[in-house]
Amino acid sequence: MTGKVGASHASTAGGAAGTVTAAAGSAAAEAAGEAAFNRQLAALTASSTKAAERDVELRVVSTELTTVKKVADERVQ
């Protein structure tokens, strides 16, 4: 009977080790998820900055074209 008791303790210890391993895996997965989120946030910020810069460039070009058109219209009149 003593062998059975030892086996029971080994099973309990194995279960506890499995729980610790699962918790460590969960923490690692959470850290990996946070890192992935931060990468996505950085990519979104970079895309947003590029879009804002392009918007400014397009506004400048549009303003210049409008100015050229006004000058051309004044010459025609």
Image (cartoon, rainbow, N blue to C red):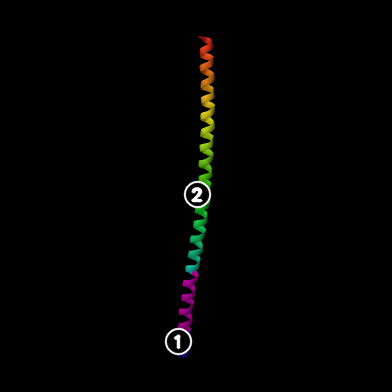
The first of marks 1 and 2 along the sequence is 1
Magenta highlight: main SS: helix
> Height in image: 67 above or below 56?
above
Residue 75, percent from left and from top:
54, 11
Q: Amino acid at mark 2?
A: Leu
Q: Give the label on residue 5, or none.
A: 1
Circles 1 and 2: CB atoms closer than 8 Å: no
Q: Give the label on residue 45, or none.
A: none
Q: Secondary structure at mark 2?
A: helix
> Which of the pair 12/65 is nearer the observer?
65
What residue is pinned by disc 2?
41
Q: Amino acid at mark 1?
A: Val
Residue, x 52% and y 41% (percent of image)?
49
Q: Secondary structure at mark 1?
A: helix
> Height in image: 34 above or below 58?
below
> Which of the pair 25/56 is nearer the observer?
56
Residue, x 50% and y 49% (percent of image)?
41
Please tell me how many numbered marks the rendered image carries: 2
Magenta span covers which residues?
7-21
Residue, x 52% and y 21% (percent of image)?
67
Residue 29, percent from left and from top:
50, 61
Residue, x 46% and y 75% (percent of image)?
16
Decide whether residue 17 is among the magenta residues.
yes
Decide whether residue 24 is among the magenta residues.
no
